[in-house]
Image (cartoon, rainbow, N blue to C red):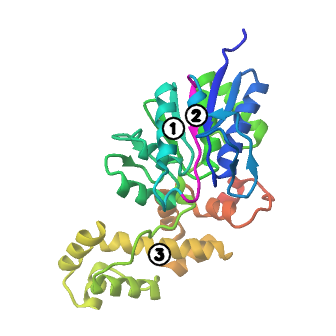
Amino acid sequence: MTPKPHTVGVLVFDDMKMLDLSGPAEVFSEANRFGADYRLTVVSVSGAPVRTSIGLRVPVDTDAASVSEPDTLLVVGGDLLPGFPVDPDLSTAAKRLAERAGRVASICTGAFILAAAGLLDGKRVTTHWQHTTLLARGYPSMRVEPDAIFVKDGTTYTSAGVTAGIDLALALVEEDHGPDLARGVARSLVVFMQRSGGQSQFSASLQGPAPRTPVLRLVQDLVQADPSADHSLDSLAAGVRVSPRHLTRMFRAELDTTPMKYVELIRFDRAKALLDSGHTATEAASLSGFPSYESLRRAFVRHLGVSPTRYQHRFATTRPASRPERDIEEKA
């Protein structure tokens, strides 16, 4: 049976991220080799070619007003979107295209365009981990999920950093044609159908500004100076000359966490840095203040969804592993 053609309109603009376009486009093109019939139309507000973030110019098929009813609308992202107001012409074009589309999706910071167009009000969304706080602050009606690779809310989809556009495109292919075809595409492109863990694998744990309160800044300094030292609640409170109960209240009020969770995050960040510099997982646990490898492993699974050894294997080098990950895991 010949599949029904599925039109994908991709809204682009000057300084867009090249991979936001090329990544999903390759997924849909590869899906056509397996029997799908995706037809991409690259759209700009005026119909003029656009300049990408790497300086290449991308030809455009048509202007936004001329697109009829795309089955899927993809809105790409760009580095300038989080720091500057969205061009009203761009957000208006996105809104009008979305009104005619069967489903709407954004790649990376393209979520800021959908948000400015009012298309994400009341929805669960995500974007690149560096900008989730800014997105949540700018559009408080949305529920931002900072660790998600992509989020589906009804017929609206948002995805994380640039390569997450490939994950999202695979999910759309699976939705349209089932897991077998999507799996074939993933294998052909040598990408995961579903990667382990979320965006926090790539982000810093202690995001946001430093504590404002002098007492909390002193706690931060004490723990960072020697993460492996005794940093129990009683010890920290004695070190900054407040009661344990008062210190706990201060952490709750300013940082919405507990002293012990804060200590764990500092130790966790130190352990990641040690793994990145080549220490073994056992050494990283000891030097960062975790009582054992197992306690470090639990922290990694809790925060990243992967073990310390698997994290190190993924991020320490681009060289292929000499043996399977499961063997490395067993000998950690």
- State the predominant SS element of the stretch in magenta: loop
Residue span colored magenta: 69-80
Name the amino acid type tagged 3.
Arg
Check residue 68 for magenta coloring.
no
Which image quarter holds the C terminus?
A: bottom right
**Dots 2 and 1: beta carbons under 8 Å?**
yes
Up-down relation of residue 71 to residue 229 (above or below): above
Residue plotted at (75% across, 50% down): 57
The location of residue 89, given as percent across then percent down, is: 50, 44
Q: Is residue 323 shown above or below 231? A: above
Element at badge 1? Answer: helix
Q: Nearer the viewer, mark 1 or mark 3?
A: 1
Residue at image x 23%, y 79%?
247
Instruction: Give the residue displayed 46% in from the left and 88% down from the top.
Output: 225
Q: Position of residue 44 (x, y in %)?
A: 62, 40
Disc 2: CA contacts within 10 A as few (<14), some (14-19) or many (>=20): many
Q: Nearer the viewer, residue 122 or 172?
A: 122
**Residue 305 % position (x, y):** 52, 54
Q: CA distance from mark 2 to mark 1?
A: 6 Å
Is residue 95 in view from this perspective?
yes
Q: Circle 1 sits on which residue?
A: 93
* Residue density around tag 3, few if under 14, some if 14–19, many if 20 or more, within 10 Å: many
Residue matched to label 3: 267
Give the quadrant of the N terminus. Answer: top right
Say what secondary structure mark 3 lies in: helix
Q: Pick whichever of labels 1 and 3 is earlier in the sequence.
A: 1
- Mark 2 vs 3, N-terminal side: 2
Gap in angstroms between the C-alphas marked 2 and 3? 50 Å
- Against 267, residue 125 (above or below) is above
Q: Which residue is mark 2?
A: 64
Please give left or right for residue 194 compared with residue 268 in the image: right
**Residue 304 shows up from this direction:** no
